[in-house]
Amino acid sequence: MIVVTPTREQQLAIDCAGSMVAIARPGSGKTYVLSEKIKHILDGLPHYRGVIAISYTKKASAELKRRASVGIADVKASFFGTIDRFACGEIVLPFLSHIWGRPQNEVAIHLIKELPDEEKEAWAWLKENQLSLADLVGHISQVKRHYEAGVIFLETVCALSLYLLEQSEACRRYIVTRYSHVIIDEYQDSGLEQHQLFLELNELGLIAIAVGDADQSIFQFADKSAIHLLSLRTVKGFNEFSITLNHRCHASIVDYSLKFLKDDYVPGDGSEIRVFSKKCAGGLDKLVEWISGSISAVRFDYDVEKLCHIGILVKSNATLAEVGSLLKLPHRVIYTHKLEDAQNPWARLFCELLSYRFSGGTTIQEILEMAHPLVQRSQIKLARLKIVTLRTQTDSDLFSSMEAVAEILLPGHTNKKTVKLLEESKMADLERAFSAPSDGELQVMTIHKAKGSEFDVVFHLDLYDWVLPGKSKRGGFLHYTGLEQDTHLHYVGITRAKKALFLCLQETRLTPWGSIEPAVESEFLGKEGLPELRVDSPY
Amino acid sequence: MRISKVRIIGYRNFSSALINFEEKTLILGANDVGKTNLLRAIRLLLDNSISDAELEPRESDFHIEADGKQADKIQIVVKLSDIKEDSVIAKLKGWISNDGSTYVRYIATRADLEYTLEIGHSPKDLEQIPSRHYLRHIHFKYVESTRKIDEYIQREKRYLLKLAKQNRGEAEIGSDTLKESEIQVTLNVANKKINELAYVSEAAGAVNDELKKISHHHAGYKVGLEAQSLNFSDFVSRLRLGAKAGDRSIDLGGDGRNNQILVGLWKAKSEIEHEVGTEAIIYCIEEPEAHLHPHQQRKLAAYLVGELKGQVIVSTHSAHIASKFSPDGVIRLHERNGSSLAASGGCAKCVDAAWNAMGYRMSVIPAEAFFADAVLLVEGPSEVLFYRQLAEQLNLDLDYWNISVIPVDGVDFDVFIKILNALEISWVLRTDNDVAKVPWSKPAKYRFVGLHRALALAGSKKTYVDQDAEVSPGMLSATRAQDEVALAEKGVYISKRDLENDLGELCSAQFIEFSGGDDLPDAINYLQAKKALRMGEFLGQYASSLASLKDDYIARPLRHAIELASARRATAPTK
C-alpha cells in the first residue's frame, strides 16, 4: 500500500517523540508509518548512532530496512532483524566473555529443540517465550557450564541479554551509545523475554516503540500472547496511538472484518458489497473446480493484473496439500522448507545458496558476505567460482557443491543434521520452496503465512465447523481448541483482500480419519449482522 | 582516549620493553636508541596512513640480542584507555571493558613473515581480526622528524582549497561561480591578444614561405605559434602557499617558520577533519624544535601542550622543549645489553613526580641534564666554569661523552638526583664541605653541614656529633678524610673546604699573582669577593696551569663521570 501523504492519525504517530505503543489495524499503513518514523529519527542522529528495529521475520526486516533507506544517507549503524539475532549479535556474543571468560572452542548457537530427548529433560524448566530473568538466574550455572563448552542455546539469548545488561557496564554503555530507539513490530506476538528486554532498554534510556494489533495475535500455540502489548498501555511514559484506517481493503470488506470482531460495530452506508459467499455441491474437488472456472471472470471484473495477486487461503496444512494437488491452473503452494526453520549458520547459508540457484533472489555478493571474517581472500575467490557453477549444475552435484562452499566460507560450523536435511530433500520440494513465485501463479498458503501480505482477491477456504473455529471432543464435551486465536485468524484472512473476498464452503469434507462428512458452515459466518454484509457469489 | 601502555617484544631495538604513556608525554633518548622505532611500533597498530602492505614484517624487524641470537616473534600490544568518544564506543562494541579500555595486538613470526592482528577488552580475551577496521574513528596524527616541510605544505594546500570550497555558503558559491566565468572570459581575451602580437603571428613566416616552395599542397596551410588556450583550473593548480608581511608578498619563510606553519596547518587540518569529541585523536610529533630558535621552541612547546585537544606525544632533542612542555609523563629510552628500555620500568608518572618537584626551577639548564649520559652536579657557576676548563686542559671531551656539568645553584641536590635516578641517568656530584654554627650556642657549636649533606646523598645515616670548639681547617679535613673513599664510591665528592680554597692550595703562586695580593688567604678572599666573575677571569689567564691537576683529587669527579658515561656505551651493565 503506497501512501504518499500521511493521514492525520499516521502523522500523529510519526511525530510523537517519546516512547509509544501503537495499535495498527490491518491495511493501516503500519510499515509506512514505521519507515517514516525511522527516517525522521535517523535524520537527527550522528552517523554512528542508529535504531534497533525488530521485526518478526527476516523478510519483514528486509522490507522495513529497504523502505527506511530510501533517500536516507546511512542506515548502517541501525539494526534491522529479529529479536534473536539482535540479542545474539549485539549483546550475547560480544559481551558474555566479559563476565564468563572466553571458552576454548569457538562459541556456537544451538537449539534446545534439536537436542536428543534425554538432554532436553535438563532444560524442562525453560518455558520458551515465558522465560523470565529470574528463571534464568535460578539456573545460571547450567547455562554457564554449556557456555564454557562453547554452546549457547538460542532459546536463552533474550534472557541472557537481560542478564548481561544488568551485569556488564561495558554492555550497557555500548547499547546506550549506539542506539537511540528500540522499535518492535508485531508486539502482539511478543514472548515474555522480549517484553522484559524491551522494558529494560527503555529503562536504560532508549525511546521504546511497540507496534501491534491484539486482534491479530495468532501465535498463541507458541505461547505468544497479546497481554504484553496490552500491558504497555499502563506503563509510565508510554503514549498510546491507534492507526485504524484500513487503506487496503474495500470499504465493504473493512465493514465485514470489523463487524466480525465487534458486535456493536456500525457499518457504513456503502453501496457495493464485495464480500461473497459460495457454497459448492460436493467436496473440495468441486470447490477447486469452481475456483478455476471463475478466475478469468473475476480477474476481468476486478481488474486483477496478474494471477499472483490472487490468494487462496486455508487454515490447515492438510487442506493446503490437497488444494495443491487438485488445482489445475498454474499455482504456487507456499510452505516453509525445514531448512528455513533451522537456526544455524550452515542452514542459513544453504537457504541463500538455494535462493540464488532457484530464484536469483540472492546475489553472490550477499552470499560471500556471510563468510567468516577471517577467511582468506583467495578462499573467497574459490567460493565465488563454485557458487557460479551452482546454477548450471546437474541436480545431483548440487548438494556436494553447496557443502563445499559452506566448508570454505564457514569452516568449523559444520552441522551434520543440516547437511543430512539437505541431502534428504527432494529437488522438487526445494525448487518449490526457494524459487520466486512467478507472476502467472496463483498463490496458495495458510493464513499464518499470509500475515503481512495482501491480494487483490482472496478465496478463503476451511470455513466450516471443527476447523474454523477449531473444536474437539473431550470426555463427551465439545469445546473450542482456541476460539480467540481462530477469531484472529479469520480476521487476518478477511483483511488480506483488497478488492474482493470469497468465503468458500463445500458440502462435504474429508475428515482426518478418512471418512466423508457433511461440512457444517462455520459459526463465524452466522454471527449477528454478518450475513447482511455479504452476498451470494454471482459466479 | 589515550594510549596508556605499550609492550614491545622482539621488535627492532627492543628485546622486551614496557612503556607507560600519559596524556602529555615526552620521549627523550639519544639518537638511534629507538625513539622512532617505538613510535613505529605504535603506528603499526594505530596509524591508518601505514598501509596493510607495510604491516608485513621484514627479517630486519626482528630484534637481535647482544649475543647475536635473533627473535623469532614480534609482539606489540597497545592499551587504549579512557575511551569516552561515542563513535569509538559504538564501533568497538564488546571490545571495550567496563573501565573503558581496549587492547590491540600485533604478532609477527619470522618463520613465515606473516602477521596477525587481535583486539579485545582484556589481554586474556583477544579476538583475531582481519584488518584494522577499529581505526575508523581513531586518528593518529603523526609528524615525523624527516618531514619535508615544503612538500607537506604544498600538498596540503589542495586540501585547504577543498575545505574552503566545501565551507562556502550558497551566496558565496553563487558569486564564485560568476567570478570563475568572468575569469575565463578574461583568459580567452588574453589568449586572443597574444596570438595577435605581430612577432607571434609572424614568427613562423619564414617557415611558411619555404613550405609553399616545397609543395603546392601547403598553399592554404600555415604553421604558426599559438598560445595554448589558457584555462582557469590551470591557474588554480599553480597556486602556491605564500606569505604576506603587512601588504607585501614575501617568500614563504625559512625552515624554522615553515616548521611552525606546518605544525599549525597539521593541527588545524586534523580538527577540521575529525569531530573533536566524537572521534578520538592522538597527536604525535617528532622533534618539533626543528630549525627554531629557543624562544620559538618554547612557544611551540606551550602551543603543543595548550592547543592540542587529545593525547600529545612529543619526542625531542631540545632542552627548551623539555623544560616548557609540562608533560605528565616522561619516557627516557636508553640502551642496556644491546636492547632499549624505558627508564623506571617505563613508569612515566614516576618520572613526572620528580619532574614536578623541580617546579619553578625547571629551565633549560637543568633540562640539558636529561639528554646526558652522565651528569656532574656542582654547587654553582664558579664550579661549572672551573670544571669545564679543567676538562679541556686535561683533554677530557665532555661533549663527546654526553656529559653535562650542571649547577644546582642553592637548590637541594636531592631534587636533581631524584629526577636523574628516575630517568636512569648516571650522576656524580661535588659539594662544599661547609660548616654552620649552631645558633645561640655557648660555647659555639658547629655542624658539619656539607659532610652531612654528602653522607645523606650517598645514602648513609652517619652523622657527626657537634663539636664545641672552633672548627679549624685541620679538623675539617680530618673528619672529612674518614669518609672520602666511601663517598667517592657512591659518586659523591666533597671539597676540602670550598672551590677557592682547594684550588688556591694547589695553585697558590698563580692565585697570588692574579689577585695582586700578598699571600694566599688574601688571594682567596679576592676571588671569593666576586665569585664567578673573578674565577672566570682567573681561568681565562691561567688555564694552562690546570693541566698539572691531572692526578689530583679535585679532578676525580670528572674522571668518574667519564667512567660512567663510557660504561653506558659498552654492553656491560652499569652501576
Image (cartoon, coloured by chain):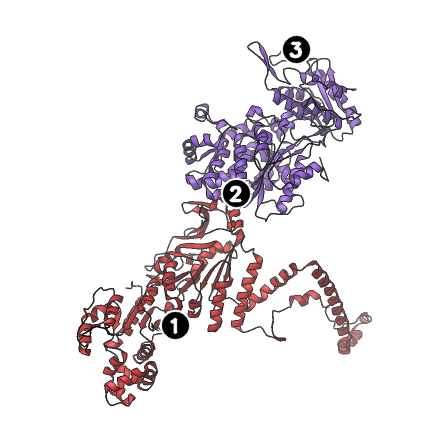
Q: Nearer the viewer, residue B522 or A55?
A: B522
Residue A4 in the image, given as x and y percentages of width and height = 73, 40
Q: CA distance from mark 2 to mark 1?
A: 53 Å
Q: From the rendered image, report the letter of the chain displayed in red.
A: B
Residue A224 in the image, given as x and y percentages of width and height = 56, 27
How packed mark 2 is, by other alpha carbons closer than 10 Å (few <14, some 14-19, many 20 or more), is many
| Residue at mark 2 | A175
Question: What chain does mark 3 sit on?
Answer: A
Q: From the rendered image, report the letter of the chain displayed in purple.
A: A
Q: Which mark is residue B441?
A: none
- Tell me the kind of residue under disc 1: Ile
Q: Nearer the viewer, mark 3 or mark 1?
A: 1
| Residue at mark 1 | B365
- Tell me the kind of residue under disc 3: Glu
How packed mark 1 is, by other alpha carbons closer than 10 Å (few <14, some 14-19, many 20 or more), is some
**Residue furthest top in the image:** A476
From the viewer's perspective, tell me whether residue A5 is left or right of residue B381: right
| Residue at mark 3 | A517
Res. B290 visible in picture: no
Res. B500 visible in picture: yes
From the viewer's perspective, tell me whether residue B322 is left or right of residue B207: left
Q: Nearer the viewer, residue A183 or A351?
A: A183
Which structural element holds mark 1?
helix
